[in-house]
Image: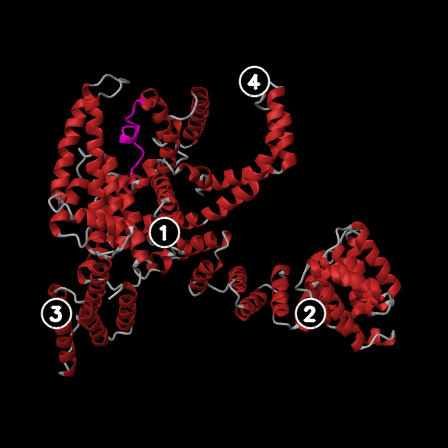
Amino acid sequence: MNLKELQQYKKRSLDAVAASHIGEATAVLRQCAAEASLPPSLMSRIDAVSRDYELMVGSIMAGQSDNERAGIFEDLSSRLHSLWTLIERNVASYDNPSLYFSTMRFERLHPEDDFATLVARYATVNRQLSVAREAMADGAPMSADVEAMVRANDETARRLFNRLWTGYPLGNEAISTLRTLVTDRECPLSVRSMIVSALMLGQLQYYDERRPMLLIDLYNDMELDLSLRLRALCGLLLSMWGHRGRPASRAMRGAYMTLELNPEWAGDVRMAYMQFIRARDTKRINKKFNDEVLPEMLRMRPDIQRRMREMDAASVEDNPEWEELLDKSGLKDKLKELSEMQEEGSDVFMSTFASLKNFPFFREISNWFIPFDVDNAAFSGASYTDLRGMLRLIGAAPMLCDNDKYSMALALSSLPSRQREMIARQMQAQNDQINELTNTEVLPEDRRRENFVNKHVQDLYRFFNLFSRAREMANPFDTALNLASVGRLSHLFDDESTLSLVAEFYFKRGYFADALALFERLQSMTPPSASLLQKIGHCRRKCGDIDGALDALLNSELLQPDSAWTLRRVAECYVARGEWEKALGYYRRVEALKPDNRAVANAIAGLLEELGRHDEALKCYYKIDFLSEGRDARALRGIARCSLMEGDTDKAASTVECIFMNNEPKADDYQLSGLVELVNGNVGVAVTRFTEALRDDSSLSLDDALAPLAPLLNAKGIDRLTTDIIIDTVNTRINS
């Protein structure tokens, strides 16, 4: 049986589980297991589920009541999910070429290296290395023996990571060994951190309830380093999101209950949730940098180089010429916006460091999860002997996540000394400035927690998007990561202040579907609010629900009848529904509140045109033309169209001429010009104009444009046959 066939069986079975049809789900599972020739141990576990389910059915048939029945049913559902995981993993393990399975097969070749053995080996080498480093003079280069120990230590840590990542399921002994290792303060923080991340990564690959249970234990351990606890928290939340539809066993439900007793749990979940939302902004920020900032910087480069040659270094700072250059380019505003995003906690460095993930260091999956460490094996070579101070400076940079610190540090050895010195001065100044504002020693604990999670989430985002083989894994950041929708977490977002905060967070960033779900929950908890209904209406419209948007906006109008914003959105909804008269009525009300608003006047004029009231529309367009002092091209086009429909061909022709003189003509302008020329009897010129219009925009419909003018054209002796021939001639010219 191949993996595709197995997935079909799995879907049928788990769909039955979701429908509470355990008997059907088990039958499908048994059929699949028989065809896949699975080992007897798995078949016996399937039989055990069947027996337990039959016992439950028997008690129901006997009319027996059981307060534990719902919990037992959830246990059975959880066991079926686990069996499918085992079967899927068993089928995929033989020839799947992914990094996960190739690593798993390698580890299976070394059964002697179990968790206990690897941990003991690491502890031994680590003690030897600590003694050797204490004997070294400060700043002295590593001896060959010390470098060998560093590499041996690094290799053992890597093996430990890989075995933990691919091991399934983890046994009680392994869990006990890992808990001891993570809580051992003699073990370097970098290795303990890596272990916690390996737990998370393996859990995202295949559900193994012992992993989230250990993550819960670590998070609840108040004696553990805060960074490890928060790393465990992030891993746990990603697991809960990734496996949100999976039933929990009795043991897992008990573990979740311990979280509710932790006074920090609710606040930490909300804080981490904000960081996950910010991570969704990274692609947008990256695009903004690449599309707007970087091209402008490249365009300005020659001018900058010229000015640099003309002034000495001392005169560069606070020079008004630089201010002028930035202002004219618009770059200053773009950089200010990015700076504000960074201050908010958004990831603005992704695009900067994305190209620096090609070092061999980043080919090893475990290295993506190690906190920055100047003693890392990657820096043990001779080229880094004189760079220890620089490495420490990078490590202290509060604006960079660990991944980016490694990128910068690894790039140092290839840079000329002068450039390294310049970078060092810049970083020192920036570090001093940031630390002055946010001294980590005096920061409140909630800010320290937020800063750590913010940078850790950035590290995770980089791994899942930049690691060379990340496409082989499920990327949690490809989804909404809406923790408020996870059943076991949703109650943490049920208070008004939290719902409002998160909803506004989504709303501000344009995630309207997520914002809508929270605004609607908020609506059920609070008194009627015009502002809230406005936001619900806006979100529904952005999500394509015009009827729902209209309903919310009309209710908002009842509470706040003179809101120009609401009236205008109601009008837009009626336009979307094709109800021109109703839309016009609402736009007239907006006009009464904002008589000089050109956008509103344009909307009214357009609706009057749709209704065939061209004389009224013409007056509106003249008003817009007056308000804009002749600079509104849309108004001129409207004057030309309406004049033409009213039979004033001279006015239409002169207005079109004005459009061509003062604006870069668009396809619509060429088409409009063609219509005027045709009505005036200039058929040849009209055909040329129509051809130009359709070449610029093939979506234009010449037939639709000519239809309203049929009476006027007939009066000029141009019948339907003639217009058909004109259309055919235009199409022929375009296609020739």
Instruction: Work out which residue is located at the far bottom of the displayed protein and give it.
Output: 62
**x%, y% of residue 38?**
16, 65
- Of badges 4 and 1, the one in the foreground is 1
Task: Specify the quadrant of the image occupied by residue 561.
Answer: bottom right
Relative image position of residue 397 (x, y in whole percent): 39, 31
Q: Quarter of the image holding residue 393? A: top left
Q: Does the CB distance between marks 2 and 1 fall below 8 Å? A: no
On screen, residue 219 above or below 425: below
The image position of residue 687, as x and y in percent, is 79, 64
Give the crowd class for mark 4: few <14, some 14-19, many >=20 residues within 10 Å. few
Left or right: 383 with respect to 94? right
Mark 4 lies on a secondary structure that is helix
Of label 2 and label 4, which has the lower sequence position? Answer: 4
> Which quadrant of the rendered structure holds the C terminus?
bottom right
- Mark 3 or mark 1, earlier in chain: 3
**Residue tagged by mark 4?**
314
Q: Looking at the picture, which amino acid does disc 4 mark?
A: Ala
Q: Amino acid at mark 1?
A: Arg
> In whole angstroms, how far apart are the C-alphas of marks 2 and 3?
70 Å
Which residue type does callout 3 highlight?
Ala
Residue 714 highlighted magenta (yes or no)? no
Q: Residues within 10 Å of mark 2 (few under 14, many from 20)?
A: some
Q: Which mark is residue 199?
A: none
| Residue that label 3 marks | 48
Residue under pointer 1: 471
Q: Which residues are magenta?
A: 370-382
